Amino acid sequence: MASDRSLRLRTRVTLFFALIALFAGLVLIGVTYGFARNSLLDERTASAKQQAFDNAAAVAEQLDAGLIDPTVSIGSYFENVLRTEPSGFAVLSSTSPTAPATQTDTTHPLADFPDELVDQVRSGGSGIQYTSVDGDDYATVGVYIRRHETGYYEAFPATNEDSTLTALLTALGLGGLGTLVIATLFGYSTSRRLLRPLSRVADAAEDITSGGLDTRLEGESDPDLDRLRSSFNDMADAVQTRIEREARFASDVSHELRSPITALTAAVEVLDARRTDIPERTQQALDVVVSQVRRFDDMVIDLLELSRLDAGATDLTLETVDMIDLTHRIAARFGSPNIDVDVDPATPREFDIDKVRFERVLGNLIENANHHGGGAISVGITPSRNKMLRFAVEDGGPGVAQSERDRIFERFARGSAARHRIGTGLGLALASEQSAAMGGGIWVEDRAGGGARFVFEIPIRKERS
């Protein structure tokens, strides 16, 4: 059984598109950024090495000519002759660990270069490494000048590459975010298109459930969806045919039984009127026949009424009535002349109602309470939300079990308190059908202090002052 907290199918489809776009975007951003970074670093490495080797060759020529001394400051030479980059710096140092270093800028000694690079040059090699100096990134190159046993070191700022990579990452991030938004919107739109036929099926099923048996789905352009439409319509046709056939059968049987039951009722009434002329034992049998014939007659009448409701005879005949006076008269007619009628002060006294249908509902509930609930105790009348008027019939019986509260409004259903009792088993079903025909509803709940409380609501169609 699916959890109530599970996501809706439309949400899951939308999230699926969003997650796919997110995953694809992250992969694309990672691959693109990594490729661009490696390309920039490779280009920067090649450029730095080439320029450092050119400058080292120029320094070697000056050393050959005796124009510079590695043990003396040559800052002006680096500034005026060598092609060092802005913000870059260079150091010329003997490979002897005890020899002093010559540098272009006293703020950047040899110690600013990576120890691994310095050791590599002092051992007679050349190399390049990336490092950070005072928070700035540099590409540092070391070149060994063999004939003078001197090392030339130059640092190239890497801020341009960092800025380029930052701008690229920002652009990729914004592009990925835009792709994610577009994919999410596309997923939502696609899920709506995919689920729209299912929504139409659900709406049609709800219409059929509420009584619109002639509801059908229109054709679909997609072959798979059109098959769904065809299958649904075929199912609806079969359901409608079966329900109408059963309704006609019940109506026909009720009509056919009406005449013999009427004749039989008249015959037993004649016998009952002359019961003094027959033996006492025969009178007992006559009492059973009379009660069962009357019950049978009531059942046929109820079945005919249900047949009319099934056939869609739900037109209301409205008339203005005094609701409190009508409630008292109905209670008296159904065997409870002294019942308490509790009326909320906010209840309108007069409004339009179908008096016959209202009597069927209230009368059946009072009769049910008298037969199966130990007698009706009171009828409460209170206004409720959405301009509805609520009627509650309370009894002092054993109440209705929670498991039976929906089933007792079905036809021929009986609760545990009503078994082996009188009645047709159709009273509560008729009350439910008639209250629905008036635009209301009916249910049962526990009564405070014990017993059952049958409640039904009907709309207040027109208030009168």
Image (cartoon, rainbow, N blue to C red):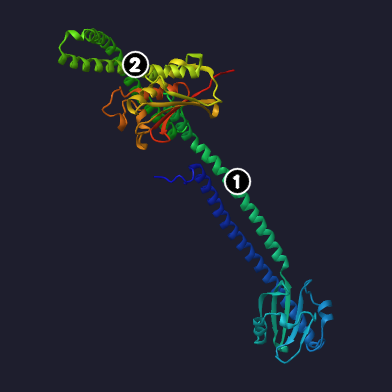
* Residue 449 percent coordinates (x, y): 41, 36
Kind of residue at badge 1: Ile
Look at the numbered disc 2 and give the secondary structure of its residue: helix
Query: Nearest the camera: 379 or 166?
Result: 379
Kind of residue at badge 2: Leu
The residue positioned 54% from the left and 44% from the top of the image is: 187
Alpha-carbon span between mark 1 and mark 2: 61 Å
* Residue 215 percent coordinates (x, y): 44, 24
Query: Nearest the camera: 451 or 32?
Result: 451
Q: Quarter holding the C terminus?
A: top right
Numbered mark located on residue 452 in the image: none
* Residue 218 percent coordinates (x, y): 46, 26
Identify the image quadrant of residue 31. bottom right
Numbered mark located on residue 182 in the image: 1
Counting the numbered discs, the total is 2
- 208 relative to 114 in the view: left or right: left
Query: Can you see residue 248?
Result: no
- 315 relative to 367 in the view: left or right: right
Look at the numbered disc 1 and give the secondary structure of its residue: helix
- 75 relative to 171 in the view: left or right: right
Identify the image quadrant of residue 313. top left
The residue positioned 28% from the left and 15% from the top of the image is: 294
Q: Residues within 10 Å of mark 1 (few under 14, many from 20)?
A: some
Closer to the N terminus: mark 1 or mark 2?
Answer: 1
Identify the image quadrant of residue 258. top left
**Which residue, given by chain and number where applicable, does mark 2 sit on?**
304
Above or below, 395 against 141 in this view is above
Q: Quarter holding the N terminus?
A: top left
